[in-house]
Image (cartoon, rainbow, N blue to C red):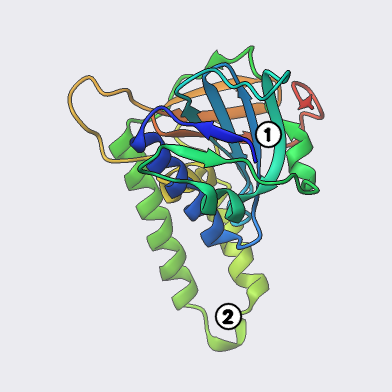
């Protein structure tokens, strides 16, 4: 088994936490791994949010496995989690699995441009809290005969498809970022705030702890990177 040497225990712990959260939403989750040099990108798709989650992991040394200097494989998230050794700051790469359809369509590596209008971290967290409260309130007010899965899904789609402030980012992307541990409370002064960028059909919410990408509807295949 190929062993990845992570930068430190903290990187290993953050990778394990990310995988655990993905598995919370899908016990059979798969992740796509791409490594080159000292950077590892881990892609996952929690089904509840319809977004692509990306966790960047620092490696202690440039990736190299024999003659291969890059890694690109889709594996079981559960098996990868089991292989993470936090004290040793290592992770083994499990055997490849047949990837789900999303794993073949990833956001482009470059060409990202800043998008204005994204609120600060605390405002984003407040937006998610208000949306969750509204969903609970509206569903609790439904009479029993109308409290069907279809009606709950309709209310959820209406709330989570709203856009954030003056941006084109759907609220569900911010909810996903918070649920996956990417949107944490504002820390010390000078700590990097989340940013919003776009490339072709994609919007990407970047935070110091990970990113959430969503493909905008109605733009066709512009900007897609199939690899």
Q: Is residue 171 left or right of residue 65?
A: left
Q: Would you say residue 126 is visible in this rendering?
A: yes
Sooner in the amino-acid sequence: mark 2 or mark 1: 2
Which of these two is toward me, 114 or 73? 73
- Residue at 63% of width from left, 79% of height from top? 148
The residue where tag 1 is placed is: 216
The residue where tag 2 is placed is: 147
Q: In the picture, residue 207 is in which quadrant?
A: top left
**Does residue 62 lie above or below 131 as drawn?**
above
Helix, strand or loop at mark 1: loop
Q: Would you say residue 182 is visible in this rendering?
A: no
Mark 2 or 1, closer to the camera: 1
What residue occupies the far left of the structure in this picture?
189
Crowding at dot 1, Cα within 10 Å, few <14 / some 14-19 / many 20+, comes out as: some
**Does residue 3 lie above or below 50 as drawn?**
above
- The alpha-carbon separation of the residues under discs 2 and 1 comes to 30 Å
Q: Where's residue 19, x and y in %?
A: 51, 49
């Amino acid at each position: 088994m190929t062993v990845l040497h992570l930068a430190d225990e903290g990187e290993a712990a953050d990778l394990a936490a990310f995988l655990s959260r993905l598995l919370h939403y899908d016990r059979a989750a798969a992740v796509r791994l791409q490594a080159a040099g000292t950077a590892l990108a881990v892609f996952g798709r929690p089904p509840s949010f319809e977004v692509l989650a990306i966790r960047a992991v620092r490696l202690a040394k440039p990736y190299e496995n024999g003659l291969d200097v890059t890694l690109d494989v889709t594996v079981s998230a559960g098996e990868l989690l089991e292989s993470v050794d936090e004290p040793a700051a290592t992770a083994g790469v499990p055997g490849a699995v047949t990837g789900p359809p999303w794993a073949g369509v990833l956001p482009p590596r470059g060409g990202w441009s800043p998008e204005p209008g994204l609120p600060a971290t605390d405002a984003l967290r407040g937006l998610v809290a208000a949306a969750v409260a509204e969903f609970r309130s509206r569903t609790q007010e439904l009479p029993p005969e109308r409290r069907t899965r279809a009606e709950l899904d309709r209310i959820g789609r209406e709330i989570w498809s709203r856009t954030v402030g003056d941006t084109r980012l759907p609220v569900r992307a911010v909810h996903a970022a918070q649920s996956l541990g990417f949107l944490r409370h504002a820390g010390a002064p000078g700590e990097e705030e989340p940013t919003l960028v776009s490339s072709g059909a994609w919007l990407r919410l970047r935070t110091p702890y990970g990113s959430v990408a969503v493909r905008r509807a109605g733009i066709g295949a512009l900007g897609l990177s199939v690899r």
